[in-house]
Structure formats: structure tokens, C-alpha cells
Image: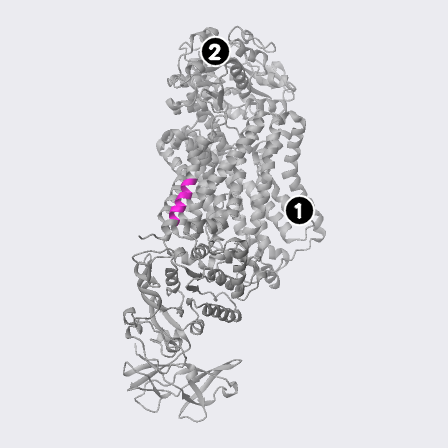
Amino acid sequence: MDPAPAPAPAASRPGGGLAAPRAARGTRSRPPLGLIAAACLVAAASLVPLGFVVAMTVATGWETAFALILRPRTGELLGNTLALMALTVPLCVLLGVGGAWLVERTALRGHRLWAVVLAAPLAIPAFVNSYAWVSAVPSLEGVLSGTLIATLSYYPLVYIPAAATLARLDPAIEQSGASLGLGPWAVFLRVVLPQLRIAISGGALLVALHLLAEYGAFAMIRFDTFTTAIMEQYRSTFNGAAANMLASVLVAACLALLLVEARVRGSARYARLGSGAQAVPTRLALGTWQAPAQAALGVVAALAVGVPLGIVGRWAAAGGPGVWQTAELGRALGSSLGLGLLGALAATAVAFPIAFLAVRYAGRLSHGLELANYVTSALPGIVVALALVTVSLRSVPGAYQTTGLLVAAYVLLFLPRALVNLRAGLSQAPKELEEAAQALGTPPLLAFTRVTLRLSAPAAAGGAALVFLAVVNELTATLLLSPIGTKTLATEFWSLSSEIDYRGAAPYAILMIALSAPMTYLLFQQSKKAAGQ
Amino acid sequence: MTEQKQGPAPAAGAARPPEPRIAPAAAQAPEDTDWHLEIEGVTKAFGALQVLAGIDLTVLRAGTTAIVGPSGSGKTTLLRLIAGFEAPDAGRILLDGREVAGGTWVPAHRRNVGYVAQDGALFPHLSVGQNVAFGLDGARYRGRRAVAARVEELLHMVALDGSYVRRRPHELSGGQQQRIALARAMAREPEIMLLDEPFSALDAGLRVATRRAIGRVLAHAGVTTVLVTHDQAEALSFADQVAVMRGGRLVQIGNPFVVYTRPADRATAEFLGDAVILDAWLEGSLAMCSLGAIPVRRPTVQGRVQLMLRPEQIRIASDSPIHGTVLDWDYFGPESSVRIKLPERPADPRIPGGGEVITIRHWNAAMARAGMDLALKVIGEGVAFPVV
Amino acid sequence: MTFRPRALASIALAAAAALGLAACGASPGSQQQPTEDPNALTVYNAQHESLTKEWIEGFTAETGIKVNYRQGSDTEMSNQIIQEGADSPADVFLTENSPAMTQVENAGLFADVAADTAAQVPAEYRPSTNKWTGIAARSTVFVYDKTKLTEDKLPKSLLDLANPEWKGRWAASPSGADFQAIVSALLELKGEAATEAWLTAMKENSKAYKGNSTAMKAVNAGEVEGAVIYHYYYYGDQAKTGENSTNVGTHYFKNQDPGAFVSVSGGGVLKSSKKQEQAQALLKFITGKKGQEVLQKGTSFEYAIASGVPANEKLVPLAELKAPVVDPAKLNSAKVTELMTKAGLL
């Protein structure tokens, strides 16, 4: 249900559907060794960044490490980051849940349209949003500007799962709340809101992780976070000790977030119990609140979608047709598409053994493997990139500065997007179907391809599309790892906008948004389906 | 593996026409016996869990065998071993006298075994027609028309018409899905059909109808059938050989009437249906209990025993020395279930028990008012189990 | 023959997984840039991308040798080259400032500059070791908001900016190699203690921007009164639309002040390069007449320094800047990063 790294516990449960009643039977047999080996290999690779951070801290020596970690600059960055989170996460939850509630549970006029519009900011990369704002209002800087841009960019991460959950929420629960004498507002607070706990905590975790990982958006408005500071250190010292130590603090912060989220989420599952058709939820009449609700959503949409699109469009218009007619634009589009495709294919292929283990042989092993990947994907791109730079330089010099290494970074960063989808797809293709095909005279390998691969293909394609979207908009790791001469839409956009060539950057922004829009819509649609599982 | 070692019991007293096909060790069987499926000493463990602890079972050609047992007894695993989805740890499996598991291994797709799963396992991405045609022998049915004709024929076999060809599995009811799954499995003209609880997902009414329809199709085609179920009524009505499974072992194999009326032990008795168990004193072939002296067939023990009767054997009589007091009753249409308390002390001091509460069935609810005193008599024989 | 069904499935899955991993591993070969050419040079470029692109285009037009480049910043790339050591894919390294060159030189990774190239560049823009050569120069400048500051209120020296009265009034881009080069000159001229004190004061007094152009833009927008940057950002903007420098005045510290520091951009050929000849040819082209004329006539507004090509006529001539004399070989970038990290600027 999550657009990006889905928190482990939610995703590691076997999907429902056909597989559920028979799942127990599959689990009793032991998974094939080749499968375990492949999945372990992937999990081991995914632990490289964590291992790197630990190894670097040890190699730096405790004394130096402490000196580098316990300096005032770290405190300053921590303060900035915490302030940003303290402001942005609640705002995102407020906007996300409020928007979702209005769209799904009230008689909001045009709620179908609003449902899509509110998800739309996800198609605008945060650094493009930042570029739009800062080029229009150059004085934007600091934590409040950071909060503004981050909130507008990331609230859909809460909105989408919240809306999906609300849409699937059994209205009978609300009705029984009402029958127990609660007013509408009390029903929302005491019945509906608690059911959104998973959506909210998961969404808030994603927002917080994005805040930790984002480079471009904050660099543009001169707001220092750990990631921007690591990038600066990198640009001064390549992979020096100071950068690595900041990275280890950043990793610690990410892990802490995962733990906090796991705590908040708790072990409870809110699902519809029992079978039977679900009633269509009744929508709350807004009455005199219709106009204020429309206005509030209008403001959000104007700020989050209108402003960036308008300003990007303005710069593009000011640039005229000239800015479109550069060889660089075509080349960058080509590399972005190529890398996106490669990343999507690789992530899907690598996710396969893990998803297969998780669905067909659910157990402690498969859970652990999945967890390893989720933890890695929670790490910021800069940490993963730094780790791969160092490890490849020292251990696999042949891989250094190759497309392969960049794709490997994409796989580590975005694997869960492929994994979550593939898992859902594979649970639609239970073992029984494969066996049925075998009993009908199909050899095992052919049965596997004709039934299991075929049935999980749509979900795999959905996951691949999401990885593609992420790769196209990835900036930090691409800056560090791209092979010589490879420029993507994101990196070209970044170098142009850093030199304040706002006009030249506009076509890149437009292409990124154009590529992201259909994927965002796909994600939005998928979330609606996934929420019930 | 209790009764089967004792060899076939004489069929005396069996009310149903088919002779019991209690499976003895293969060697004891007549030379010309046409065994279609032979399972010898098969074991299977998943990790530390021993799921099958030595299974011997033989199935006659064109016979219908039901493997019945509570969930977790290992019956589905046994079926999967026959199908070739799993390999046994020890022992061997023969189809048509040919070894398919044990020393040699024949994979599922080369066993020509039909298999219908609990939910039908129809391929959701294929239409009904494509599902049925999935396993068709491409060499025999060349061209679209030949395939279409065969598909239609198969659909007719399960009483569905050609209009279903283009439908998708999710558009069908559960019963239709099961019938299509059967048609699909029949497409390869298997000599043996394995049914893994194929009716359990269906509603009660549909379950019986589908079971009859499928049973007819299989009987008509003369296909050897093995059905796995946890529903004893289903097992008793469907099969001419019932194998009762518990804890990874076959505790009794025999014809439905025999296993129902003469279960091997108390647990089997209670699993196969409601049972009235009374403390009794057995002397010769007469068991004395709170319901009087009940004849017992070929008793293996003497003295203190537990006597098993089926509730329907206990009737309300107009006149009988045995009395009981109605405690309460449960009315459900065709009959009532009546709880009766037997007298505190039996007349004869040698007889154990007394004061037991038994449940019987009776068609006339008016006969059963709380506090009423009823005269009771027992029809037929009881079964004696040693006291544990 | 015992052939278990799961064995087959496991082989299939392992194959699928291997395929996936191979896709990442093998792709570098199959997915290399279409421009891949065994004779192409690889430049690690920390100079302005647009400037280097002009040089490369001129060079390829003249010699037919293709050039790929990796864009980065000075010390990022110098550290990268040092880490890569003999395996570095780089043939030529171009920087904005000399400290990064010195760093690579000290690691012993540069080949000697060819004699004909050295002959084109005056000795003051070359290290005595001849391991690299100057290719362009840029001057430190204090840009200020003309609407807020008059000439008499301008700082007399870079060191004045450490005084409390400048608190919150000036900006810089401390993460950039440009500013770090200025600090390295300060370090060389005034010593470690003074530099450390100045940096500590700077952390207190200055606003940090990312990039010199952003800093200048902030001055123009009135966000801050002045900024320590390099001269060409101002001229570059003036030559375009001037929209980011309408209100901006330039103030050169002169008087051999650390703030009058003229930084030499360097170029060198890596010892590990297997295309020494082509690499030296590129260096020769850049320091030659055509290469220097790119500086004189182009939009970079950096100073031409070699082959007798004069600076762009819009610029204040180098001779008038009264820059302090600093031996480029003595500028220590590692120490600067360390001091700036210590001061909390990085």
C-alpha cells in the first residue's frame, strides 16, 4: 500500500486471496537450497551499506569517530533535522488524513477528481518543487521553507494509504460506533482514526525517511540536513572520514525511525472480520462546510501542484523553443529511460527469490531476509552511494563507475517497491495452480512459467513501474555513482538549476513530471486495491 | 493398521451390497486381484514433524476410496504423494503395478493422475474453455475445432453446456468451478482421479449435489477414485472403501458400513458419527450395561469394557424394562435429539455404570418432554472396546 | 534415478535469480555509453562544465580525438583520483583551483607536463615541479549590495569580515572549492591559528549559500549585504541578462590582502593514463592560443593566462589586482577541509 519502502511488518504477511487457506501446507516443506542461496545473496548485498557504516566507524578509530560525531556541527544538523521532522511530519499527517477523510468519507463535491488531484504532488520530485519555489521566491531559506516544500511534496505519502484505508473501512464499524451514542466527530476520533493507525504510522515513517534522505530540495533552499552536509563533505573530500561519520549518524537516525514506527504500529491488525459483502460507506453531508472544504483543498492543490507546474511552465515559456533543442536533453532522456528500465528489470529479478520465499515458504528465514532489504531501503541514497563507491574502489575496482554499480544502488534503494508488488502477485498464484498444471501433464518448469510467472506478471510489471519512477527521479546516488559521461534528467536538471539556469532546467523538470505522472496514477490505483489485503 | 492386519473380515451382517474391500497386505490377496494403486510402508516427515508414519493401502481398479480423518492427520499429504507433488521419505507407491515413487521416481506430469483441489485451482487467467483444454493431448486433438469439440464434450460430461466456454472462473459459482476442475482433470482421460476435499468449500446443499454429480461422472467413466475428506458423512456416502486416518496412520480400512458399525476403536467410532459409550461387563458375547444386555459380535476382550452403540440403535419402546428420564431435547425438523438420563443404579450389581446421560434421535418431538419417563430398547449389536 | 520435483523448481529459481544478479553485473559491458571509443580521453573535470565543453569541442574539432568527462568539484575529484590510484580511468584532470592539483601531485600521480605546453604558460602560473600547469585564473572579489553599502563602508581586508560588526551581513559558499582555495591562501599567508580564528568568526558572522552564483543572487535580492566570491560570476551574469546582479557592486581587496588572492585553475596529465600523447595534446590545446581565446572571447570570464592571450576586455586586468604572491604548490586543501570541518562550516 505504500508508494516507497514499505515498512517490514505490514508487507511481510502473506497476502490473502486464494493462497490463504492453503498457505500452511506450503510452509511445511523446506525451500529449495538454490532459492535460499539466491535470496541470502541478495540480502547479504543489501547489508553492504550497513556493514560499510560500521566498518568505516571502526576503521576511523573511536577517538576520531567521536570527535567527528560529537562536534557542534552534528548537533546543529541534528537540530535542523529534528525541527524539520517535528514540523513536517504532523503537517503531512494533518493534510494527508484530512484530505483523505474529505475525499472518501464526506459528500465533497467532485470527490473523484479531488482524490486524484491530492495524490498528484507525488509526480513532482521534491527538488523540482523546491526549484520552482526558490526561483519564484529567492528569499526562501531555512527550516520554515524546508517545511513548506517538504510538506507539499510528501503529504501524499500519508494521503494515499489513508485514503485507501478509509475507502475500504467497513462502514458497519462506524455505524456501530454511532449506535453506541457517538456523534460524527467522536466516531471519527474514536473509531475511524484508530483504524488509520497503520496507514498513518507507515506514511509518517515514509515522510520522515524522505526528509532524512532528501538532498536536492533542501540544498536549493540552503537548509542544512545530514544529507546535504554529507554531500558537501563528499564534494570536498570525496569519501572522507567526516562524510562517513555523518553517514553513520544518519543511519542511526533511520534505524531509530524504523523502531519507533514498529512501536507505534504495534502488533494490532485492523481488518474486517467475517465474510459477506461490504456495504457502501455513507458519506457525511458537509452542509455549510462544503465551501470551506473546497477552499482548503483548493489552497493545498494550488500550492502543491499549481505553483510548481505554473513556475516550471513560466520558465519553459521564457526559455522558448531553444531550451528544448539541445542534444543534452535527448541524451539525458535516453539515459533516464535506459537506467529506469534497467533498474526496474534488475530490481524485479532480484526481488523474485525473496518474494517467492516469502509467499511459498513463509517463516523466520524469509522474514529475516525481507527485513534486511527493508532496512537498507530505508537508508538515504547518499549512504548507499558512499558505501558502494568505497566498497567498489577497494574490493571490486572493475565495477567502479559502471552502469552496473549504479543499477545495483537503485536495486538496493528501491527493492521493496518491486518486492511488495511481486509478493502480492505471487500470492495470486498459489502452488496449487502450478501443481494442477503438473497433474495435467505439464513439466514442472513449464508449469512454473505458464502459471506462476504468468499470473504474477501484472503485479511484477506494476512493481517494475514504481522502481522506474523512483530511478527517473533519483538524484543523490546518481550524482555519485553515474559512469563517466552519463547524465540523467535529474542530474542535468540539478547542474543547470545549481547554476541558476532556470530556463534551461525547465524542460528537464517537465520531462520528469511527464514521466512520473502515469506512474503516480498507477500507484494511486494500486493503493486502492492493496488496502484490503 | 489395526484391522487390516487381521485380514478380511467375513462380510456377514453387512447390509450394503458391495463386499467390503478391506485391504490386506498385497501378498494375501488373490493372484488376479486388479490393484490399481498400491502404497507400501510410506512415511513422510516435514522437518521434525512426522506426517505419515507408515501407510499401507491398496485400491482396486475402478474402486472408490475415501481417506477420511481430522485435519492434520496427514491425508492430504498422502494424496500429494500419490499425485507426485511430494516424494515419500520411505516406502513405495505403485500405479498399475509400476513403481512411481520409492526406488524410481515418476514426476507428477508423467503419472497420468487426475487431481482436483479443494478450491478447484482453476487458472484465473484462462477462460473456462482454455482451462479445460489446458491438459489436452495436442497430438490427439489437432486444430481449434477438434479441441473445441472435446472441450464441449467434457463440459457436457459434468452437465454444463457450451456457453460456459468463454466465461472466466471468477464468474462461476463454487459448484460450477468444481465441476469444471473435474472436466479439466478428465480431459487427459486419467485412469485414477485424486480429489482433495473438493466439496468442502461448497454450501451444504450444493455440496451434496456436486458430490453426486461428480461421483456419477467418475463411476460412468470407470475411473479409480481416491477422495480425501474430513467429512465422515461424505466419505461414507461417496466411497466403497473408507480408510480412516489419524495421526499419520490408517487406523481402519473397510467398507463404509463396517467402519461405521464396527469401528476399530473409540476415537474412530466418535469420529465417524455420534456414539453412545457406556461402561459394560462383557461375558461371552453379551455386554451388560445400563441399557441391559446387548449382544456383541466376536468380542476380543472380556470383563470390564466400554460398549459403543450408535444413537439410532436406541429406540423408544412402548414396553421395555429399561427406562430413562428425558432431560431436554433439541428439535430440528425431521427429528429431535433427546437427552436421556439412565437410572442411577442398574438392577444387577455386577453391571458397572449407571446414571449416564445419553443422546438419541427420535422422529416424534411430542414423545420427548422434559421429565418424561421413557422405555428404551436397543436394536442390533454393540461394539466392545477394552477399558483404557 | 531420483529426480525430485523441488530440485527442478530450485534450479529454475536460482537461474532466475542469477539472471537478475547478472543483469546488474553484466550491464556495464552491454550498457556503456554509445560514445564509447577506445581512443577517447577521459577528463575529470572540476572546471565549469560549459567552459570545459567549449575546450573539448575545439579540441575534438582540431584533432578528431573524442573526450568524455566526469563532472565534479575540485577536492572531490582529487580525493577520488588518489583513491583510484593507478586504476583511475582519468587521463586528464582539470580544476578550478590549484590546491586540488597540489594534492594529486603530492600523491605522485601526475606525469610531467610536456615541454611545449610549459613553454606556453608563464612561470608564475606553473609550479616549479612542472607536474601540472595553470590553465586559467580567477580573482577573489567582494560583491556587495550597492543600495545598502557605499564604498567607504566596504571592508578593507578579508580579515575585517571576522569583526563583530559584520555579523549576519555577508555570505559565502563554504562548501565550494573556490572559497576553500581562498581559505588555503589565507592559511598560507597568515598561518593556522589566525585562519582557525577567522573561520570560527566566519561561522558566526556569515550566511552559507550553495554556490557562488546563489550567494551573489542573494546579495542582489537584498538578503545579505555582501559576499566573498570569484569575479566571473558577476561578469557572467552581466553578460547574460544582469538580472541577478543589477544591484551588485564589485570590490577588489588588492594590497596583497588574502582577499585579493588570485587562484590558478590547473590541468594535469595522470601518470596512469595509457593515452599520454593525446592527454598532453589536450593540455597543450587548452593552454594554446585557441584554448586561451575561449577564455578571452567566451562567456566564462575567467582570466586567460597563457600564449600571450589577453584577458577579456571587460575584466579588470590581472596586473591591477595586486594579488598576494602565493606559491600554488604550498596551498594545502586537506588542512583547509579539516579546519573548516572543525569550525562547523562543513
Which amino acid, mark 2? Lys
Residue A436 falls in which quadrant of the image? bottom left
Judging from the image, mark 1 belongs to the subunit labelled A
Quarter occupied by the C terminus of chain B: bottom left
Coloration of the structure image: one colour
Judging from the image, mark 2 belongs to the subunit labelled C
Query: For this view, does B44 lie left or right of residue C154?
Result: left
- Please name whichever residue, A92 or A487, is drawn nearer the observer in this view of the structure: A487
The percent coordinates of residue B293 (x first, y second) are: 34, 89
Is residue A102 found inside the magenta-colored segment of the image? no
Q: Is residue A36 above or below residue C71?
A: below
The percent coordinates of residue B202 (x first, y second) are: 51, 66
Instruction: Classify 10 Å Cα crowding around label 2: few (below 14), some (14-19), many (20 and above).
Output: many
> Is residue A379 something one can see in this rendering?
no
Quarter occupied by the N terminus of chain B: bottom left
Residue placed under numbered mark 2 in the picture:
C284
Q: Is residue A448 above or below residue B316?
A: above
The percent coordinates of residue C253 (x first, y second) are: 55, 13
- Please name whichever residue, A437 or B245, is drawn nearer the observer in this view of the structure: A437
Q: Which residues lie in the magenta part?
A: C9-19
> Is residue B311 something one can see in this rendering?
yes
Q: Are marks 2 and 1 on the same chain?
A: no
Residue A211's mark?
A: none
Q: Nearer the viewer, mark 2 or mark 1?
A: 2
Q: CA distance from mark 2 to mark 1?
A: 62 Å
Residue B47 falls in which quadrant of the image? bottom left
Instruction: Classify 10 Å Cα crowding around label 1: few (below 14), some (14-19), many (20 and above).
Output: few
Image mark count: 2
Which amino acid, mark 1? Leu
Residue placed under numbered mark 1 in the picture:
A113
- Label 2 secondary element: helix
Residue A58 falls in which quadrant of the image? top left
